[in-house]
Image (cartoon, grey):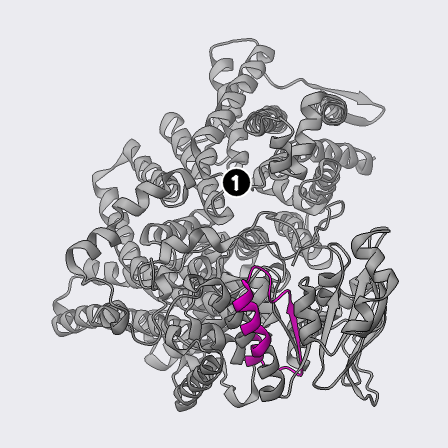
Amino acid sequence: MNFITNLIGGLSLGGIYAMIALGYTMVYGIAKMLNFAHGDIIMVGGYTILVFTAQSVHPLIAIALAIVFCVGLGVVVERVAYKPLRGASPLAVLITAIGVSYLLQSLAQMFFGSGTKMVTGLDLGSFNIGSLKISVSTIVTLLSCIAVMVALNLFVKYTKTGRAMIAVSEDKGAAQLMGINVNLIIMITFAIGSALAALAGTFYLMRSPSIYSTFGSLPGIKAFSAAVIGGIGSIPGAMLGGILLGVVEVFANSVSAIAPYTDAIEFAILIIILLVKPTGFLGKKRREKV
Amino acid sequence: MMKFTKRYLSFVLIGLVMLVCGVQGSGLSASTAYLLEKVAISIILAVSLGLVVGFLGELSLGHAAFMCVGAYLGGKVSQLIVEALGGSQHDSNFLVLILSLVIGAASAGLCGFIIGLPALRLKGDYLAIVTLAFGEIVRVIFTNANVFGGAQGMATPRFDRKYLFIIGLALVLATIAIVQNLLRSKHGRAITAIRDNEIAARATGINVTKYKLTVFAVSSALAGVAGVLYSYANFNLQPSKFGYNYSIEILVMVVLGGMGSINGSIIAATLITYLNTKLPLILTGELAVLQNLFYALILILLIIYNNAPALKGFREKYNFKNLWNKLFKPKHDPARVRDDAARWDVVPTKIEMNEVLSTDVVIDNFGDNSADIGERGGNK
Amino acid sequence: MANKLTLTFKGALDPIKAKLTGKTAPCKKIESEYVLETENLGITFGGLKAVQGVNLKIKKNEIYGLIGPNGAGKTTVFNLLTGVYIPTEGTFYLEGEELKGLAQDKINHKGIARTFQNIRLFNNMTVVRNVMVGLQNQPEYKCTLFESLFRLPRHFKVEKEMRKRAKELLEIFGLLEERNALACNLPYGKQRKLEIARALATNPRLLLLDEPAAGMNPNETADLMDTIRLIRDKFDMTVLLIEHDLKFVSGLCDRITVLNFGTALTEGTAQDALNHPDVIKAYIGN
């Protein structure tokens, strides 16, 4: 019985990680950069929900507003901080991303203080199947994650914009020559990634409703590990990696002897995967040209 | 003269500080001594991280974690020795200090080696990822390991407060000497060659992985030294102190000082440590967060200013070096160029990572950065 | 774990690579009259056979040419011989020692040095330092990291000797004057020469030159031909070169192999090979 509860919990947590990881992996695949500030977009989404639910706005509307706000933020960050550095050394872009992450955290602290705040109105209760107690939010999370992933896959494969994304990720220069507006595609990528991050933030708040300025860091870093484990740049890889980490986390947490070391175990998995298969499960190996 | 200034000015200055403060000795207030210790720790950290970021062109996000390993293991060893000798906490002597420094450096260096092994043979940002993961692992382990006091922290051995800052500054000198000696040797030449053109370096018989690992292990070991110093300067070690934010703070120092410049790192480390001590007195309560905001903005603006392709023309026209040269430097004269004209600090970090996380070496495009370093070469 | 780690470091991660690619590190040694001998050398990328069945036999002190139309796989052969790619079929021997599967730096240590089609110098280093990097791994300039870090006497001795040797090499190539210029500031022809000097500094037994005359005017080309002959005589060297300039090839090479679509069309003396009907067909068409 416990096993099934854990499995469902793990899958839904994994779904959240997968959604965040999709943001990392798409931005990596298309803009060729590691967006370290992605985790903090989750935090911003969480605070937006906090602000609106505190004004007793309906939670669904609050979530929608959070998504809109995060999309805007993602696009602004891309335009202001990353776009000027296109073509510069990747190390520079990486450090800027870290700076943006740090900036967002400081801003959150400035506006909301450093304490923990509680978000209300997201608890959907739970139901019983036999002796099994399952919370509704877990099921909602799981189903939404599946829906988002299917939709994203269809979007990338079958729409014009999606195919343009694939083209840009393969070869930016050639895509530009084919008349694709590369800057626009990169912007759309950031927008989609940020929307997913806001959604993931919502689901994360359903699990535990407390929010603080580094709220997004840990899920962000874990989702990032998931993206690398699955093979960064690969959309199915991000899902696979996310679900793997989520399941491992929930099962490790259920054993009291190793529960304190859960985070360490997850990051150890990352290091071991890099040692054995540096491209991750589904990542492509690129050949050098000499 | 320029060369001498660049290489040895920091030694002279730090030596002077040591001398002046050492003569004052007992007259020095405890808070000043503590500030000096903190400055020493920051300089060691910044210079050693600068070795990885500025000279190797790799990013480490877990420098504080290596420091943590050094602090805990070095501190534990001296604690055990002092206990075994039957003394109280306050009896740590010079030999014990040296021993714990060695243990701290060795353990952190070993961690660096093990962490670098999977990451550095790959091209791209793998090191950033792996060090980030390592930082989290270290935090979790030290928070939960009862041997090290767990989340409550571990009490650390003490050393005579009047002299600890002198030892700290001596360690700074040793760090600078080690980093400069490393860079100005055949090994350093190999490292520049790798950063300049990795494919050519491999074809010229350089074992790229070995050199990257060596540099990273040396850098981690130095972070371990800083950690031991930290454990002596503070009463209590807490794993939460060595988190991601501390690593970022060290990175800010390196970026602020200018990547690839040792002297820059020293100045930036001193400045930021001083501000860290003084600002909380001014920015109290709600304003405290302004400090972090300030660092974040510095990081972003400096990097964009120094790297944005669009600002290249502006940068070349108005940078500090050009203004300085215009005012104080004689015209370039090929006859006066001596051997060894390439200067470490002018070589820009320019590993092109078009495919950031690909497992293979990527093509480079070095043609476009020649302008950055043109001042000593013939026809620029 | 610990055992595995030391293993991977010692062989510069060859074991891991070998494990991933399913190959074992070679060390077969046979007697051979050839400096370089390739045996059915080939590589497949995905389903594409980029190079297949190449059999080169190069004698000592030969200048050997590898020619063929664009995309014939010439540079790929060089990449196979220098360990950039690991051959998927066949193997190659340097003076009878099988080198297939070794890492690039190890192959260089065994005695194959190369230059690149698009020049790859250490642009931000001075000319003399470029050559000194080449001298790095010579046993007579051995100096451990420890000795360098703590400035023991050997560090200074080795640095001085390396510089002296580098200057000698530069003098041979007429680059001594420019020794303190940055490599990127050299004119094109001198950059080519510097790249060759750097390759020679690694003390190879076989020198691979990838299109050494590309982008040169006739005077520079003639000068380069002299230089290559000089290298052969002065350094007792064997040279394998890729070139498009047929005049250059026929004037310089003792023997050549013509590649087309990854396979060898013919091999022999320059005149014979260039007059071979298949070769004419490949270059000019029917």
Residue at horizontal 43 percent and vertical 47 percent from the top: B245
Which is nearer the eye, C250 or B256? C250
Q: Is B180 situated left or right of A77 in this image?
A: left
Task: Name the quadrant of the C terminus of chain B.
Answer: bottom left
Which residue ends up furthest to the top in the rendered image?
A: A57
Q: Position of residue B180 (x, y in %)?
A: 36, 72
Residue at horizontal 49 percent and vertical 52 percent from the top: B61
Q: Looking at the image, can residue B230 be seen?
A: no
Q: Amino acid at mark 1?
A: Phe
Q: Position of residue C189 (x, y in %)?
A: 50, 66
Q: How many marks?
A: 1
Residue B176 lies in quadrant: bottom left
Q: Callout 1: residue from which chain? A: A
Q: Position of residue C225 (x, y in %)?
A: 60, 75
Q: Is B335 situated left or right of B246 in this image?
A: left
Question: Mark 1 sits on what residue?
Answer: A36
Which is nearer the eye, C75 or B52? C75
Query: Badge 1, how many Cα within 10 Å: few under 14, some, many 20+?
Result: many
Residue at horizontal 12 percent and vertical 67 percent from the top: B27
**Residue C221 included in the magenta stretch of the image:** yes
Residue B106 in the image: above or below residue A216: below
Q: Position of residue A37 (x, y in %)?
A: 50, 36
Magenta span of residues: C199-227
Residue B309 in the image: above or below residue A278: above
Q: Is A5 situated left or right of A262 in this image?
A: right
Which is nearer the eye, B57 or C242? C242
Residue C82 in the image: above or below residue A250: below
Task: Name the quadrant of the N terminus of chain B.
Answer: bottom left
Which is nearer the eye, B5 or C6? B5
Q: Is C198 situated left or right of A108 in this image?
A: right
Give the structural element (helix, strand or loop) at label 1.
Answer: loop
**Residue B204 included in the magenta stretch of the image:** no
